[in-house]
Amino acid sequence: MTAVLARDLRVRLDGNVIVDGIDLDVSRGEWVTVIGPNGAGKSTALRAIGGLLPFTGTVELNGTSVDRLHRRERAKTIATVAQSPTVPPGMRVLDYALLGRTPYIPPLGRESAADLAAVEEVLESLDVARFAGRRLETLSGGERQRVFLSRALAQGAGILLLDEPTSALDIGHQQEVLELIDRLRTERGLTVLMTMHDLTTAGEYADRMVLLAEGAVVAAGTAREVLTEDNLAKHYRVRVRVIEGDHGPLVVPVRG
Ligand SMILES: Nc1ncnc2c1ncn2[C@@H]1O[C@H](COP(=O)(O)OP(=O)(O)OP(=O)(O)O)[C@@H](O)[C@H]1O
């Protein structure tokens, strides 16, 4: 079963073509990571797939066109963590994470005990439960990033769209978060589509990788197929050595 399907996806912003005809398939339970240099169009493609930007072409989530899904239905299907989510000023961590339960709360209703329990469990698993009463702006960048992820996981959607979800995390929390996502994927069959700049780590976790450059897919396949010295030299304009590691290729930049 295909969880995310994109065909000839194109996005124009202010008259510029940013995403230039992407095809993408992510099977249910699969982890696909989109890589590419700054400005390649990764965030824009993800936002279009999440139904957050106008596009041309086709985007289907679990077989239904994304623009046919009403807001609530879409939120139950796909949860997105943007690169820099906007936070209502003064909002506390628990209330922010509870926003993830919005699609389950009836209009004019309040969250149930089950909603609260679901959120508390997620906050616990991301090591941020102790900040529940704190305002988001008082947290460190990495603590806040884990709260953003909590809100998305609390949403209980089967598809996770994550734009650089670990960019602000220390190496320990980065591993914890990626392991948690991987565990949820195994336990609940979650589908993961994410972007990441750390190529070695990206390759360790992803089933498949997609390399975007100038709005187009220039390589796709396993980490070994995509993370080659030639691909990286050509599209990142950098000299790297790619060494075989225990869990996939290790990408090491070379000076000079
Ligand atoms: N509203 C806009 N109008 C014009 N150009 C835009 C607009 N928004 C984004 N862009 C441009 O689109 C290109 C792709 O941006 P996008 O954020 O998708 O790249 P990215 O691959 O996610 O980059 P990064 O790795 O730096 O996060 C960039 O060159 C950006 O400047």
Image (spheres, rainbow, N blue to C red):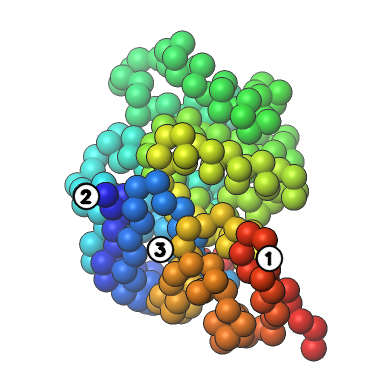
Tell me the amino acid under the disc marked 2.
Gly
Disc 3 or disc 2, which is closer to the eye?
2
Q: How many marks?
A: 3
**Residue at mark 3 to residue at mark 2: CA–CA distance:** 18 Å
> Image point 76% across, 81% down: which residue?
254
Disc 2 or disc 1, which is closer to the eye?
1
| In the depicted structure, whether residue 18 falls above or below residue 82 | below
The residue to which callout 3 is attached is 45
| Quarter of the picture holding the C terminus | bottom right
Choose the circle earlier in sequence order: 3 or 1.
Answer: 3
Choose the circle earlier in sequence order: 2 or 1.
Answer: 2
Please report contact status of discs 3 and 2: CB closer than 8 Å, yes or no: no
- Residue lying at the far top in this picture: please name it: 113
Q: Kindly tell me whether mark 2's CB lies below 8 Å from ligand 1.
A: no
Q: Could you say where residue 48 lies in the image, as x and y percent from the top left?
A: 36, 58
Q: Which mark is residue 117?
A: none
Tell me the amino acid under the disc marked 3.
Ala
- Residue lying at the far right in this picture: please name it: 255
Left or right placement of residue 236 versus residue 113 in this view: right
Q: Mark 2: few, some, or many residues within 10 Å (few <14, many ≥20)? A: few
| In the depicted structure, whether residue 154 falls above or below residue 220 | above
Tell me the amino acid under the disc marked 1.
Gly
The residue to which callout 2 is attached is 63
SS at mark 3 in the image: helix
Left or right placement of residue 173 versus residue 78 in this view: right
234 vs 73, nearest the viewer: 234
Q: Could you say where residue 116 lies in the image, as x and y percent from the top left?
A: 50, 17
Q: Mark 3: few, some, or many residues within 10 Å (few <14, many ≥20)? A: many
The residue to which callout 1 is attached is 245
